[in-house]
Image (spheres, helix red, strand yellow):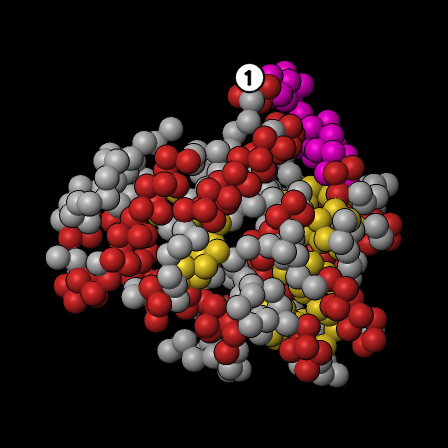
Amino acid sequence: MNAPAATAIERRLAISGGEPVFVEPLHVGRPNVGDRARLHRRLDGVLDRGWLTNHGPCEREFEARLAEHSGVRHCLAVANATLGLQMTMMALGVRGEVLMPAFTFIATPHAARLAGLTPVFCDVLPGCPQVDPADVARKITPRTSAILGVHVYGQCCDVDALAAIAREHDLGLIFDAAHAFGCSYGGRAVGGFGEAEVFSFHATKFANAFEGGAIATNNDALADRLRALRDFGIEASGRNVCLGMNAKLSEIHAAMGLTSLEAMDEIIAANRRNAQAYREDLADVPGIELIAPVDPQQQNAQYVVIRVREEEFGLSADTLQRVLRAENILARRYFSPGCHRLAPYAGDDGTAATPLPNTETLSRDVLALPTGTAVGSKQIDAIASLIHASRQRASQINMRGEE
């Protein structure tokens, strides 16, 4: 495990010429591998069978395990979550406008645009990363045909409120659950809400398939359309029934996904320990607030995200990120700026068409810190000490990059 180069923080900060606390970079999302011996056995089996893609036994087992875990009838493995979102909107026949939060990864609106739709961005709740249902309701027009909710940081958005709005206005309801595999809402596993929910198994997710995603649904007809769409528009009988794409997950990726699923309880436990350690170490730092779930036992703790309130802390989130990165702590700005200020959805100067004040405030303040199985209490103590030291030296850092 990457240990700090120094135990005391009473030292010259690296941003002004000191030695970094960490010798090697400490990432927000270093890949979790699981049992390498099991992975190697699975990979040997794939190579021995000579069945490398096109819905082999690893992919089918991976889908079955995902469906069982999520409590749904169907879980279709796909090449990545972006394609999964695009396919879901296409298979549902969504047209015109789709409502979604601007506080999300850029892949969310891109998937809608690639499906021929117009993303309409909504604000989040004050001080919260989840979409504001009231703003969603306000932005419904005759062109609106779907709501795309996002479970940000593994914390579920208000599923019940969005479902009520969708029913009232006869809209489709989809969830971007890229952060939310292994999470639950109201005692039910994420996966069975709305018409479909889309998971990500990218390498940085706590459960990964190197690269990949999955679409979970209880809608039998939708699942059939998605299977054809995933495979060039060819249904199980071999007949081409629609315009399709190649979005299959290979056997190699599925083998990694299965191995990762076997380790998920251990990984989630490590994430929760890390989140608690950060919570304790940063509890007395003015201006630093952890964005915490209402019920930690219902989320995977995949992300540890702080709000940096510049007025109290003395530094902006951008400046604190620079301080930490100089120490080889690769903190990330998830998500800054909001999608409404990114191309191709904003003007050339980043001007947003619609003001989203809560999103602006949150995007300005957030900073994701390293966690996962590659991070332990010593690393977290060192990171917290650096954050303490940064506040103590805020005026010097702001004036000339520290003393």
Q: Quadrant of residue 293?
A: bottom right
Residue at the location (59% across, 71% down)? 125
Q: Is residue 62 magenta?
A: yes
Residue at 17% x, 45% y is 11
Q: Which residue is mark 1?
A: 37
Location of residue 70 in the rendering, given as x and y in whole percent from the top left corner? 75, 43
Residue drawn at x 56%, y 45% is 301
Answer left or right for 116 relative to 347.
right
Considering every residue shown, the one lying at the far front of the view is 284
* Label 1 neighbour load within 10 Å: few <14, some 14-19, many 20+: few
Left or right: 400 as drawn, with respect to 180: left
- Vertical relation: 301 (above or below) 316: above
Figure check: 233 above or below 203: below
User: How many numbered circles does the render carry?
Assistant: 1
Label 1: which secondary element: helix
Quarter of the C terminus within the rendering: bottom left
Can you say whether 385 is above or below 105 in the image?
above
Residue toward you, 200 or 233:
200
Q: Looking at the image, which residue is at 79% across and 58% down?
A: 195
Out of 168 and 230, give the one closest to the viewer.
168
Residue 246: tell me if it is visible: no
- The amino acid on which the numbered mark 1 sits, given as a three-letter code, is Ala
For residue 283, above or below residue 273: below
Q: Does any portion of residue 58 appear in the rendered image? A: yes
Q: Main secondary structure of the magenta part?
A: helix
Residue 226 painted magenta: no
Residue 230 x %, y %:
71, 47
**In the figure, is residue 154 to the left or right of 23?**
right
In the image, 342 versus 375, the foreground residue is 375
Q: Quadrant of the N terminus?
A: top left
Which region shows up in magenta? 41-67
Picture coordinates of residue 162 (x, y %)?
74, 68
